[in-house]
């Protein structure tokens, strides 16, 4: 090939880009386990299928109460409440909270219906059947509300998002956990994109 023929074969950047874009197409999308999705690109929006957390939960070990019941509690004037049961994280709440009663809750435990605050255990003296509360706790204290991290239906990631470890705290890609109800795998589609 002589020099003149070589010059005819040389393309400018814009011409080469146009030719390339005209002759490529996205790869087909496929479903993969969430833990295998790191580094891939979403082919469609990723939407939360459930609230996270799925219930109102305790942010610390303590006692679920009605805030108004302990409004005036102090070390000099403790409020005594009957202790009617307890709930641990991961268990269903079988105890009904409410006014003039306390329920022992551990960090992550669901908040009993009728309770609106968790008083931390360091502000409580416990006997067999009662507690004495030495500090007030306003409504909502030490409670992570249902959907407080992610609401059902919320957009977690847009189509075209490259998934990376830690890109969204609720997905925890490196641990194969999802925000999906009991699902081991995340049910979404991704598309691999060629890179240099």
Image (spheres, rainbow, N blue to C red):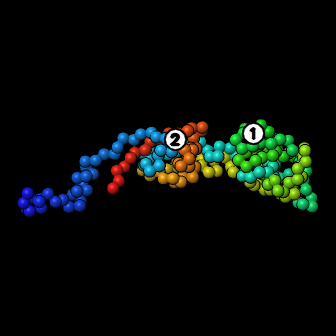
Query: Quick one: 140 or 187, which is closer to the camera?
Result: 187
**Mark whose residue sits in front, 1 or 2:** 2
- Element on which disc 2 rests: loop
- Residue at the spot 74% in from the left edge and 52% down from the top edge: 60
Across and down, in percent, residue 8 comes to 11, 59
Across and down, in percent, residue 117 comes to 77, 51
Q: Gap between marks 1 and 2, in whole Å?
A: 28 Å
Q: Is residue 91 visible?
A: yes
Q: How many marks?
A: 2
- Residue at the spot 24% in from the left edge and 60% down from the top edge: 14
Specify whether 67 is left or right of 34: right
Give residue 44's quadrant in the image: top left
Q: Is residue 99 visible?
A: no
- Residue carrying label 1: 93
Specify whether 137 is left or right of 30: right
Q: Crowdedness of circle 1 by 10 Å Cα count: few (<14), some, many (20+)?
A: some
Across and down, in percent, residue 9 comes to 14, 57
The quarter in which the N terminus is drawn is bottom left
Specify whether 142 is left or right of 8: right
- Residue at the spot 45% in from the left edge and 39% down from the top edge: 31
Above or below, 9 against 51 in this view is below
Mark 1 vs 2, N-terminal side: 1
Q: Crowdedness of circle 2 by 10 Å Cα count: few (<14), some, many (20+)?
A: many
Query: Quick one: 22 or 191, which is closer to the camera?
Result: 191
Specify whether 166 is left or right of 193: right
- Residue carrying label 2: 186
């Amino acid at each position: 090939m002589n020099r003149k023929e070589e010059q005819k074969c040389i393309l400018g950047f814009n011409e080469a880009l146009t030719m390339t874009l005209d002759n490529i197409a996205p790869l087909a999308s496929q479903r993969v386990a969430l833990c295998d999705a790191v580094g891939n690109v979403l082919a469609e929006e990723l939407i939360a299928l459930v609230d996270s957390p799925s219930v109102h939960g305790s942010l610390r070990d303590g006692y679920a109460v009605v805030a108004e019941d302990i409004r005036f509690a102090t070390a000099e004037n403790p409020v005594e409440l009957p202790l009617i049961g307890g709930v641990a994280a991961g268990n269903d709440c079988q105890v009904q909270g409410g006014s003039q009663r306390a329920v022992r809750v551990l960090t992550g435990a669901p908040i009993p219906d009728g309770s609106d605050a968790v008083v931390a255990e360091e502000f409580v003296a416990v006997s067999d059947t009662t507690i004495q509360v030495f500090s007030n706790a306003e409504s909502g204290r030490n409670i992570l509300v249902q959907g407080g991290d992610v609401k059902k239906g919320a957009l977690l990631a847009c189509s075209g998002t490259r998934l990376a470890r830690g890109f969204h705290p609720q997905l925890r890609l490196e641990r194969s956990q999802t925000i999906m109800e009991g699902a081991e795998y995340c049910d979404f589609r991704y598309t691999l994109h060629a890179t240099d």
